Image (cartoon, grey):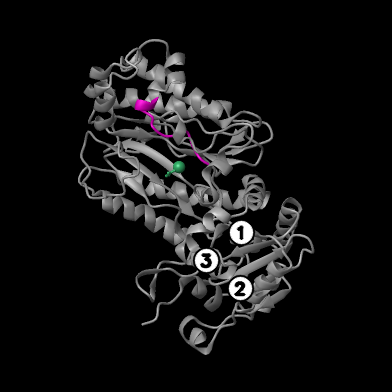
Amino acid sequence: MRTVRLIFLYVCANSKFTTMFAKEIYIKRRERLCERVDSGIILLPGNVDVSMNYPENTYTFRQNSHFLYFAGLDLQGLFVTIDSETRETILFADELTMDDIIWTGPKESFKEIAATCGIETVMPVKALETFIQKAKAKERTIHFLPPYRAETAIRLSQLLGIPVQEIKYKASERLIRAIVALRSVKGPEELIELEKAAEIGYKMHEAVMANALPGVTERELAAKAEYVALSKGTGISFPTILTQRGEILHGHDHGLTLEKGNFLVCDAGAESLSHYASDFTRTIPVGGRFTQRQKELYQIVLDANNKAFDLIKPGIFYRDVHLASCLVLAEGLKSLGIMKGDMKEAVAQGAHALFMVHGLGHMMGLDVHDMEDIGENYVGYDEEISRSPQFGLSSLRMGRRLQPGFVMTVEPGLYFIPALIKKWQSEKKLTDFLNYEKALDYVGTGGIRLEDDVVVTESGNRMPGKKRLPITPEEIEGLY
Ligand code: GLY
Ligand code: MN
């Protein structure tokens, strides 16, 4: 049987097609994009359905986030072109065939749909080829983004006459920079949607915390989180990490049964109905009671998380917030005898990265790692600051100076990764700062990560949503 497209059902069978925001918002966004790109034609391809295991069994449709941002049309198979000089904007879309109507239901004409995002001109998709040929004949620049899906890369290759393996290298840096500048600063309408995603994320974690008892399986808990995400939003914003092996950073296996004495890491977030993301991590002792050792380690990560919130405000480099948070972590590890010496120097030399191998956080918006499809360094770094090659710091996705309206994650972590500790020990790396025998004694504790989301305000920061998820040891123990 032909697959029913869930998105089509949502917008067609139940209601009149509508974009998330008023059309004036999309018109304004496109105007601001044209001002920055200044010349040439901007080509924005939407996403198409992607097959899972045979052609008509497709993954749930997810629209391209840039397409959503500038056109708001959550439907597959569309293209938009914007002439940055004349401002002429065209939607390329094919009207439904009778077959489409039979299998996926009727909907309005694309003329009506285009009007919902302020686009007046609609042409069939096959007209795009001629449109591009004419533009090329006039030596107009065609600006496009590096594609992250094979389907888009192939289509762009056909349209532009560029070999498919070269497409991503021919992407427009001017367009990338313009989009990063616009999408990095969230508008009030976006902050409302991020709040909704946060609320769903909270409920996901509450469902996990309420059931994290010995004998329950990780799979059952992951399902509880994802049930909330699917019943209140469009689903998860990234594959759920729910594991007692928290030292495996992106471990997606849910094969273990919860055992007393273990930490459980749950890193999970939701996508709101408008596709805005949340991303939270909580680490809890199975059954809700910390051992003394667990509590000591946990408090270090909590202090590192809180330190970031003390500092986040416009003007500060996020790399400096990362380093300040790492210093708190290192001082805590020194107090336990795992690190030694001068902790400022230890952090400068990257010794703490043995235990916190990743960065403090990333931008978040329509994508959980916002805009990373067009290049992490464009999103997190700029002409003022470039990415460090040092181990640990090199994994910091977001380092640049903060502005009001930025939304990021704050996610310090502490991990005892046996293979890494043994490797550094055998290399006698940074022995002035690291007590390897003591560190090996902590192997088996797993990992701890505490992640909140943050909105940069005019004067400081705030968390999205109505409240912070339980995070202090007292709050966690009080749940059980
Ligand atoms: N929450 C998963 C990540 O940030 O990579
Ligand atoms: Mn994250």
Numbered disc 1: secondary structure = loop
Q: Nearer the viewer, residue 69 or 280?
A: 69
How crowded is the residue under tag 2: few (<14 C-alpha within 10 Å), some, or many (20+)?
Answer: some
Task: Classify residue 12 by image quadrant.
Answer: bottom right
Instruction: Identify the residue position indicated by label 1 in the image.
Output: 144
Instruction: Identify the residue position indicated by label 2 in the image.
Output: 17
Instruction: Identify the residue position indicated by label 3 in the image.
Output: 47
How crowded is the residue under tag 3: few (<14 C-alpha within 10 Å), some, or many (20+)?
Answer: many
On the question of residue 441 being in view, the answer is yes
On the question of residue 210 being in view, the answer is no
- Ligand 2 sits in which quadrant? top left
Quadrant where the N terminus sits is: bottom left
Task: Say left or right for 88 vs 281.
Answer: right
Of circles 1 and 2, the one toward us is 1
- Please say if 344 is above or below 55: above
Q: Residue at x 53, y 37 (%)?
A: 398
Q: Is mark 2 within 8 Å of ligand 1?
A: no
Q: Nearer the viewer, residue 11 or 384?
A: 384
Query: Which residues are the magenta region?
Result: 353-362
Task: Classify residue 311 by image quadrant.
Answer: top right
- Please say if 320 is above or below 53: above
